[in-house]
Image (cartoon, rainbow, N blue to C red):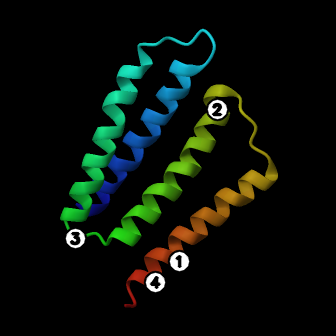
């Protein structure tokens, strides 16, 4: 259950961030700010519930932040035609490796 809550936190945060981009781009529809105003509190609520359910803070926050960065970069490429260079792709891969190491390390305390 903790992982479902963390996934909800990640997806809510990414949706809010993408909505912020939609609202703030030139000619953007300001109604997207409603999704921003809802998405971030929902993300923090899911994160708090995941912590309350027993997920360690370092693991939860590390995965939340890293997955958010990676998913936002990928979605920005698709939705906004923003650049995604090889160096950026390598960074995303390193983020994934870092998240894996955090999770593996958490099991050995």
- The alpha-carbon separation of the residues under discs 2 and 4 comes to 33 Å
Residues under numbered marks 4 and 1 in contact, where contact means CB atoms less than 8 Å apart: yes
**Residue matched to label 2:** 78
- The residue that appears at 71% across and 33% down in the rendered structure is 82
Q: Residues within 10 Å of mark 3 (few under 14, many from 20)?
A: few
**Residue matched to label 1:** 101
Q: Nearer the viewer, residue 102 or 44?
A: 44
Residue 109 place in picture, x, y as percent: 37, 90
Label located before the other in sequence (1 or 3): 3
Q: Which mark is residue 59?
A: none
Image vertical order of residue 94 relative to residue 92, above or below: below
Task: Label 2: state its secondary structure.
Answer: helix
Residues under numbered marks 3 and 2 in contact, where contact means CB atoms less than 8 Å apart: no
Q: Which mark is residue 105?
A: 4
Q: Nearer the viewer, mark 3 or mark 2?
A: 3
Residue 8 place in picture, x, y as percent: 32, 47
Q: Nearer the viewer, mark 2 or mark 4?
A: 4
Residue at the far right in the pictured view? 86
Task: Label 4: state its secondary structure.
Answer: helix
């Amino acid at each position: 259950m903790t992982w479902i809550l963390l996934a909800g936190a990640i997806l809510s945060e990414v949706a809010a961030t993408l909505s912020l981009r939609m609202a703030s781009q030139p000619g953007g529809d300001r109604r997207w700010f409603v999704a921003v105003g809802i998405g971030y509190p929902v993300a923090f609520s899911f994160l708090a519930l995941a912590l309350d359910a027993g997920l360690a803070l370092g693991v939860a926050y590390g995965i939340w932040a890293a997955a958010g960065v990676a998913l936002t970069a990928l979605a920005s490429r698709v939705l906004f035609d923003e650049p995604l260079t090889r160096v950026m792709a390598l960074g995303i891969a390193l983020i994934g490796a870092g998240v894996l190491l955090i999770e593996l390390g958490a099991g050995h305390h």
